[in-house]
Image: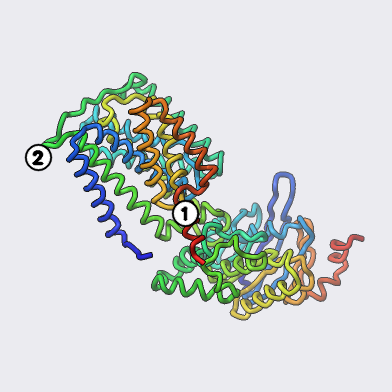
Amino acid sequence: MTEVNTAKFALIVIAIGAAVMAFAHWFNVDYLFFASYTILQFIVLSTAWNILGGYCGYVNFGSAAFFAMGAYSSVFMHKFYPLPIPVLIVISAIVTGVAGLGMGYLTLRLRGSFFAIATLALAVVLQTLVVNWEYVGGSRGAYIIRPESLAFAGITINYIEYLFALMLLLAVLALVTARVIERSQLGFGFATIRDDELAAEACGVPTLRLKLIATTLSGAFMGMAGAPFPYYIGYLQPQSAFGLEYAVNSIAMPMIGGTTSWVGPLVGAILLGSAQQYATVTISSAVNLLIVGLMLVAFVIIAPNGLIGLVQERLRRRQP
Amino acid sequence: MTALLHVDNISKRFGGFIALDGIDLEVQPGERLGLIGPNGSGKSTLVNCICGTLQNEGGAVRFDGQVMDGLAAHQRTHRGVARSFQLPRPFHSMSLADNLRIPLLYTVHARLGPLRSAGDLDARCLELLDMVGLVKKARQMPRDLTQVEMRKLELARAMAAEPKLLIADESMAGLSHSEIEDILALLVQLNERGITIILIEHIMSAVMSFSQRLAVLVSGKKIADGKPEDVVRDPEVVRAYLGQ
């Protein structure tokens, strides 16, 4: 296999992104942007989940909490001092990155299902906080009036296209980061944590520090995915921001795609995300989670290592 | 000559059970020490306290002139203590070569600065695998190995960290006679390169042929320490092993 270096890889992904953008623009159907935005958002979320869950083996059930924290950071800033969305994304990344670090520090002594339950508890605590916080809308939710279009350097672009482009960039950033981690010393360290923490320590791997790096990065990317969300949805309420679908999807997508490589969450998010969009339009939006559940069950039985695992197994068998 | 490892009156309890009760132990640079004792006598707990997997409650562990109490396991590895586990704990998702890459990246790399290139790193992995006779299986996964190969991988991985002291925790349990010879030869070869070795073992023939000195633990206390042939004749040791 020929090695593709990071710069080249980034360029390839950006080129694909630009092609997708041009294609969508040419079609000029707003729905296409809406639907693709959701899929891109899930690419970011599942890639973020995979940094902790796939590479390190720590299952996080609290993805929705980080996503919502990103979204509510935007709502807060929108009321407090409106800023352009790219700046909001950076702010959300900082907020949720710090939250990830804090969560890691509090919970990483726990392993397996205990860690998973602790992350779930974090989501519940945060949702309760937000529901009771009047400034960001409390349980009523918050309206954010989205402008029709955005004028930038003399060019006017459709606002949904702008959001789509931002999410596309985030997806590119997430994928490039995940791929860089995978091939670095950090990635090897993460894998030892997944395999055997005691042996990792004995080999000189500073496991606690690495796990904190993972929770911080993972949290930051989830927050970034959430930051533009209030502008996308227009009306943000706690139930939708902390929705079960974010927690479930960000686990199911990497599992279905395969957790050991950056390709897994990408493939899983595209597959599951499109299936959900299709079902939402053709059947009903309530079928979403049913699809996720059924696919997850199917994949656990047929391909426990995801689609990537299935392909790798094939390749291995072909070799003598 | 100053001791490489200096265990000074350490103790460790698990709830009401006293696992280590004031153990003193010195190991000189380049020495081959055998550590024996009945099951549950505290051998593995002692190893865990030296390596930082557990923290001792009383006393102190000094290594190479530095106090190690309170240091995490990986920090002790960086300072030159390596261990193999009683039950092999390879990194299951990595090839044999990658298993050895971990200590090279995280310990040797951190200690000596960058290993010059990716090529150097690969070469060093293969060199280590060659030492234990596993070089042909470099691309294979740990699940493809036999028990004895797994033990060898475990030792090679400990060696990859370039330690001053190697603690081999029952690396021969469950192996056949010829396999034991294999591992013993390997350990002696490592010792000849200047690495101090503590061997924890139940198989007496192996311990006797390997050790220059023998220490005996019983119920968390050290009851004997000296020349192997003297220690095995010590009435207290005989009583601990055979009963009265």
Which mark is drawn over residue A155? 2
Q: On what subunit does the disc labeled 2 rest? A: A
Q: Where is residue A173 in the image (x, y as percent from the top left)?
A: 30, 49
Q: What residue would you read off at disc 1?
A: A190
Closest to the observer, A147 or B53: A147
For discs 2 and 1, the disc positioned in front in the rendered view:
2
| Residue appearing at x 36%, y 39% in the figure | A42
Residue that extends furthest to the bottom in the rendered view of this protein: B192
Dot 2 falls on a residue whose secondary structure is strand
| Residue appearing at x 68%, y 75% in the figure | B182
Q: Is residue A209 visible?
A: no
Q: Position of residue A200 (x, y in %)?
A: 54, 58
Q: Position of residue A226 (x, y in %)?
A: 33, 36
- For label 2, count other residues whose C-alpha is less than 10 Å away and answer few (under 14), some (14-19) or many (20+): few
- For label 1, count other residues whose C-alpha is less than 10 Å away and answer few (under 14), some (14-19) or many (20+): many
Q: On the picture, is A55 further left or further right than A28?
A: right
Tell me the amino acid under the disc marked 1. Answer: Phe
Q: How many labels does the image show?
A: 2
**Of marks 2 and 1, which one's residue comes earlier in the chain?**
2
Residue that extends furthest to the left in the rendered view of this protein: A154
Tell me the amino acid under the disc marked 2. Answer: Ile
Q: On what subunit does the disc labeled 1 rest? A: A
Is A69 drawn above or below residue B9 in the view shown? above
The image quadrant where one finds the C terminus of chain B is: bottom right
Dot 1 falls on a residue whose secondary structure is helix
| Residue appearing at x 18%, y 40% in the figure | A25
Which mark is drawn over residue A244? none
